[in-house]
Amino acid sequence: MDDADITERLSETIAKANRYQSRKDEPQGVANGQCWFCGEDVEPGRRWCSKQCCDDWQIETN
């Protein structure tokens, strides 16, 4: 594993930790205009941008 691989994994870990922290601060059930998993913009009233993000969010939070 080279420095680029280590940096990429560290960046992914930090991004995942940031998503987790933002979820902890967000009241459950509230759509906020962004996907709860990846942070992409979503239509009003939606919590996830795709089924995959919904499934991944449920795996990470359970």
Image (cartoon, rainbow, N blue to C red):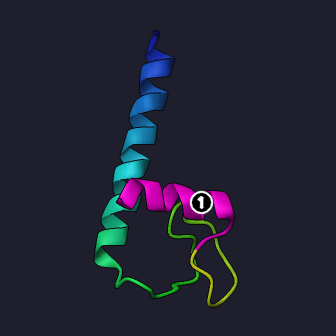
Q: Where is residue 8 in the image (x, y as percent from the top left)?
A: 49, 30
Q: Position of residue 9 (x, y in %)?
A: 44, 30
Magenta stretch contains residue 51: yes
Residue at x-position 46% and y-position 9%: 1
Q: Where is residue 42 in the image (x, y as percent from the top left)?
A: 67, 77
What residue range appears in magenta?
48-62
Q: Where is residue 4 in the image (x, y as percent from the top left)?
A: 50, 19
Indicate left or right for 12 with 22 as reference: right
Tell me: residue 7, above or below residue 13: above
Judging depth in this view, the residue of 12 and 55 nearest the camera is 55
Q: Name the residue under label 1.
A: 53
Residue at x-position 34% and y-position 52%: 17
Could you tell me if residue 38 is visible in this image?
A: no
Magenta stretch contains residue 27: no
Could you tell me if residue 58 is visible in this image?
A: yes
Q: Residues within 10 Å of mark 1 (few under 14, many from 20)?
A: some
Q: Circle 1 sits in a helix, a strand or a loop, which is it?
A: helix
User: Which amino acid type corresponds to the residue marked 1 in the rendered image?
Assistant: Cys
**Quadrant including the C terminus:** bottom left
Tell me: residue 61, above or below residue 9: below
Tell me: residue 41, above or below residue 11: below
**Magenta stretch: dominant SS?**
helix
Judging depth in this view, the residue of 59 and 31 nearest the camera is 59
Furthest toward the top, the residue is 1
Location of residue 33 by image quarter: bottom right
Residue at x-position 52% and y-position 86%: 31
